[in-house]
Each structure stands twice: as structure tokens, then as C-alpha cells.
Image (tube, rainbow, N blue to C red):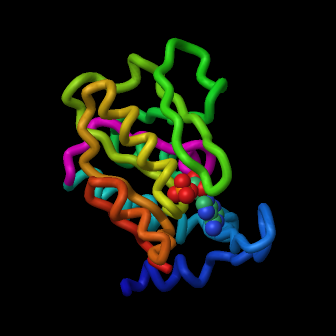
Amino acid sequence: MTDLSTAVGAALRDVPDFPKPGIVFKDITPLLADPELFGRVIAWMAALGRAAGVTKVVALDARGFLFGGALVTELGVGLVPVRKAGKLPSESIKVSYALEYGEAEVELHVDAIAPGERVMVVDDVLATGGTAGAAIALVRALGGEVALAVFVIELGFLEGADLLGVPVESLVVL
Ligand code: AMP
């Protein structure tokens, strides 16, 4: 484990039974409130994106936006939001994915990714992989190539990384 992983692990706050009984919510707000540590996380993500030669960062609704926005200023590439259904204003494509109970939908603007573009997907937490998997499907539907997916925290016991079919980098694996 790197010094950065240890420091981020120590900064996270576990909130039991949020948003519902049985879930331990990984709260990243202490990390966001620490500009030195947050900056090191962004630098770690930027190094990965630079090495992969990405031309877009695809950030996942909603906490992925916090990392994506800072990351693109380091990388010098465009930021693309994948949003929950009904939020994007212009023409979009949509995909449904399974949740623990029921299903959810995410959307992407049709002109957000050019065919052949190399993309990096970013979010705070990888749990079952349903959300990131749906985002990857949307990028691919527009002809983009997902070079890697990057997370601050991966709940390794849920084995979400195995579902994604792209290289996955996580700072803290629990
Ligand atoms: P999943 O689709 O199961 O991989 O869930 C990932 C999405 O749900 C991410 O956008 C996370 O922000 C959020 N999420 C899932 N589980 C947790 C958790 N235990 N703590 C915080 N966020 C979570």
C-alpha cells in the first residue's frame, strides 16, 4: 500500500446504515476538505490518465464530478458527465442497469465522445460495478474506447472490477 493509499484510507469516514440499513457508506467529504490530500489524489489520477493518453474524462453522477472537474484541469482534456436519467439537456443516449433492488438509468450526450477517442472513467466508489459498467457501455455506443476506469475506493469483496472489462485502478481497496 502506498503512502497516499494509507493517507486516503485514514481520511475516509464510514457511515453505518446510510442510505439504508446494512450499507456502510464511504464518506469522502473529509478528503474533499483537505486540499493537500485532495491534490495528491488528483495528481495520482492525472498520472494514470496521461500514461494512458486519454483525450476525455467521463465522470459519474454525482461524486465523480468532484474528482473529474479537478482532474481535467491537470490533464488538459475535456470533461464529460454521465448523468442519471432526465438531467442532461441535449440529445442523449441511455442505458439501464440492475441495482440491488430494481434498476437505474444513466445518460450521455450523443456528441460528447468522438469515435475512436480514448476515455478515462472516474468515480469515488466502485461497488458492484453496475454504474461504471453502464457508463462504459454508453462510451462504447458512441465509438469511444475506455482506456481505464479509476476510483478512489473499491469495495473489492463485491468483485465489481471483474465486470468492467477494462483496466481498473483504485487507490484504496477494501
Ligand atoms: P455500483 O454501481 O454498485 O458500483 O455503485 C457505485 C455507485 O454508488 C457510485 O457512484 C458510488 O458513489 C455509490 N456507492 C455504492 N456503494 C457505496 C458505498 N458503500 N459508499 C459510498 N458510495 C457508494
Residue drawn at (48%, 46%), measured in percent from left and top?
A: 68
Residue range of the region highlighted in magenta in the rendering:
52-66
The picture quadrant for ligand 1 comes to bottom right
**Residue furthest to the top:** 91
On whether residue 78 falls in the magenta region, the answer is no
* Residue lying at 61% horizontally and 43% vertically, measured from the top left: 103
Left or right of 106 on screen, residue 163: left
Q: Residue at x 69, y 74 (%)?
A: 24
Task: Reply above or below: 156 against 120.
Answer: below
Picture quadrant where residue 112 is located: top left
Residue 77 in the image: state x and y as whole percent: 34, 36
State the image coordinates of residue 76 (x, y, percent, origin top left): 34, 39
At which x and y percent is residue 157? 48, 77
34 and 65: which one is in front?
Answer: 65
Q: Is residue 121 left or right of residue 35?
A: left
Q: Is residue 80 above or below residue 112?
A: below
Q: Is residue 62 magenta?
A: yes
Which percent across, then down, holds residue 51?
20, 55
Q: Is residue 154 above or below residue 3?
A: above
Please give the name of the residue rendered at 52% of the width and 29% of the height, measured from the top-left corner: 107
Task: Place residue 139 in its image quadrant.
Answer: top left
